[in-house]
Image (spheres, rainbow, N blue to C red):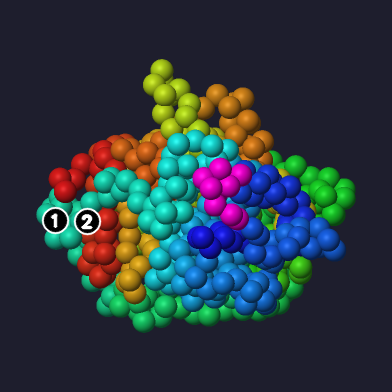
Amino acid sequence: MPEPVILIANGDLRLSANRVCWPAQQQAEAAVMEAVRRLGREVRRGHPVDPVKEHGFIDSQKYGMQVFRHIPPEAPLMVVEAVWQYSHHILHGLYSHKGPILTVANWSGQWPGLVGMLNLNGSLTKAGVKYSTLWSVDFTDEFFLNGLRKWLEGQPVVHDTSHVKALNGAKLPEQAERIGEELATRLMREKAIMGVFDEGCMGMYNAIIPDELLHPTGVFKERLSQSALYAAMLAVTDAEAQQIRSWLDAKGMKFLTGPNHETDLTDAQILDQCRMYIAALRMADEFGCDTIGIQYQQGLKDLAPASDLVEGLLNNVDRPPVRHAITGRILYEGQALPHFNEVDECAGLDALITNRVWTKLGFDPETTLHDVRYGEPYPVNGVEEFVWVFEISGAAPPKHFIGEYQGAVSERQPPMYFPSGGGTLKGISKPGEIVWSRIFLEDGRLKADLGRAKVVELPREETERRWAITTRQWPIMHAVTYGITRDQMMARHKANHIQVAYAPDAAGANLALAAKACVFRNLGIEVYVCGSEHGLAL
């Protein structure tokens, strides 16, 4: 008789999030277990539901180690995710597990399992752990069942990745080659500093670049402390904080405020976020940082409002001026200070290079990462397209929005994540041509995927519907990837995050993609170009 399939569910560190999300996880697990049993196999959970905590997630690395001590090392193991999860809770057990591993997510934007699974997949890829992966709306479709059947028979699940082409030594446009060589040479000669406020946020093992792989690119980490950031916030005066708020008000940005600290965005929370914005710029200047990443969640969330407003502003060229506390010099005047959300260092390296390539080309250099959150087909100009929901957890640069600052609104982050509140920087991304990318780690090397996409404007009621089934407080981008299907994207993408930047038109986007690919290649990063409409003959 084949061994029973063991199912585990990894979750958040935060009790409030795990309790709220548990019903969705139960529903997904029940459907997956039913599918396994219909195919004639026994399946059981590898850990119980905790009646005190009121959920059945693995919610810490400590508990994860306890769970894996009781899982047979040769058993077929499924990790089923309908929620965001902290990969380090279970990575240790997956490292040493000898049986086949299958990661599974529900095709839903609700909490979301898709984002959690992509992070876990990226972490497993970096770790060199073999795994298969599947996703489904209701776990009854042929795509899912065929893949599950193969996996239960002991075969790996192989997806179509024919959209991916290695760049290797391909000849690229002369201008792109010239820019790529110039910027890469300058970066390796002059070096750059990546400011990292408390490394390793939210269990994202895939988001940590080992120093020995980062240094050959010319980028070196300055490891900073969020406690130092908090101390720097305390040194910011009320008048300085109010100047930032007044600048944003004058730009037409809206703040949806209320009186209740526990549930509303309050004026006091906004002023604390303005203090953090000033403190972050002053610390970045003090340490000579070319890009920074704030951990965003653990620790700081219990002391201060969320860093989202700060992050969106830093990534925008047009932003409130901040002066040096002693000399009065304006810091990073006329520039964005690229910020990588959730201390995702792969996104940080990408953002730094994007900023330099786009600036060299004379394009707007605003860039941000987004979660690969969800997607559904939708008719665009009479043609049905698969329209992704890219939705970063809190803030994007206003330059990306329809109406820029006048189209931006700040809403309170959900209390289950952020007890101290804080506002987001939310808007609807404007239509246009973009370059998307992701730096990731595989086989002990830095690699990068690049592709092209268009951002489309959907009817407002459809945007509101998509916000309602994801997170309505967060900025949204409706993206159509060129030459890449839903399942190809999910099969290939090795991260929960995707980097995006606009170009003035399709030709400009193709040139920017080629130039960026050249910089990556000259820095020793293994480059792959994905999909179509990028203008390259590969």
Picture quadrant of residue 262? bottom right
Residue 42 sits inside the magenta stretch: yes
- Residue range of the region highlighted in magenta in the rendering: 34-43
- At horizontal 64% and vertical 74% (from top left) the residue drawn is 70
Dot 2 lies on which element? strand
- At horizontal 36% and vertical 81% (from top left) the residue drawn is 212
Residue 418 sits inside the magenta stretch: no
**Residue receiving disc 1:** 170
State the CA–CA distance, disc 1 to disc 2.
9 Å
Picture quadrant of residue 130? bottom left
**Residue receiving disc 2:** 166
At label 2, the amino acid type is: Ala
Q: Residue furthest top?
A: 382
Dot 1 lies on which element? loop
- At horizontal 56% and vertical 66% (from top left) the residue drawn is 87
| Location of residue 285 with respect to 390 vertically, above or below | below
Counting from the top left corner in percent of width and height, residue 445 is at 32, 72
* Residue toward you, 382 or 37: 37
